[in-house]
Image (cartoon, helix red, strand yellow):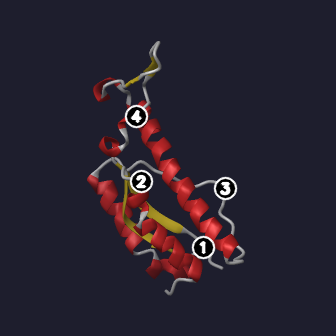
Amino acid sequence: MRMSGIGAWADEQLRNVASHYTYAEIPLWVIMPNHIHAIIIIDENKIPHEKRIVGAFRSAVGAFHETPLQQRSAIQYATQMQSWLSVVVRQFKQSVTRFANENNIHFAWQTRYHDHIIRDVNELNRIAEYIENNVARWDLDVNKT
């Protein structure tokens, strides 16, 4: 499968995401003609300290205090990581859209994206295998254009 100009631009943006967002890494992705699959890792320890606000409260002088990791619920932690993920995805989508507009390419994203928290190494391996084999299954895609 050969990428279009917009596909090549999207590929470049995914390659460079860590240079814009030090807390994000994309070790695996595939760009298909009508969709993208990617594993995006959000590293809590690389989020700029002044921006780590989940579970926080504002003191009288406006400083932020974090709730220690062990005191956060799994839901609070997932919500925090999802928030950082949405920043990366939103900026990626904006960059590709801007490229399309500047090059008069008719293009539109679907309004939402599907995300899933990978909970263990078995699930990671299953999803990685799915991504790696996506191109080979293109002929079976019912939504291909």
Left of 102 or right of it: where is 32?
A: left
Decide: is 71 above or below 15: above
Q: Which residue is mark 4?
A: 50
Identify the amino acid type marked 2: Tyr
Determine which residue is flagged by label 1.
Answer: 34
Residue drawn at x 38%, y 62% is: 127
For the view shown, which residue lies furthest in the front direction?
Answer: 61
Residue wearing tag 2:
21
The x, y position of residue 84, in whole percent, is 46, 45
Of marks 1 and 3, which one's residue comes earlier in the chain?
1
Q: Bin the neighbour count of mark 2 within 10 Å (Cα to Cα): few under 14, some 14-19, many 20 and up.
A: some
| Res 32 seen here | no
Depth check, front residue: 63 or 133: 63
Amino acid marked by disc 1: Asn
Q: Amino acid at mark 3?
A: Thr
Disc 2 + disc 3, Cβ < 8 Å = no
Q: Position of residue 75 (x, y in %)?
A: 43, 32
Dot 2 or dot 4: first in sequence order is 2
In the rendering, which numbered label is found on residue 111? 3
Query: Image quadrant for the C terminus?
Result: bottom right
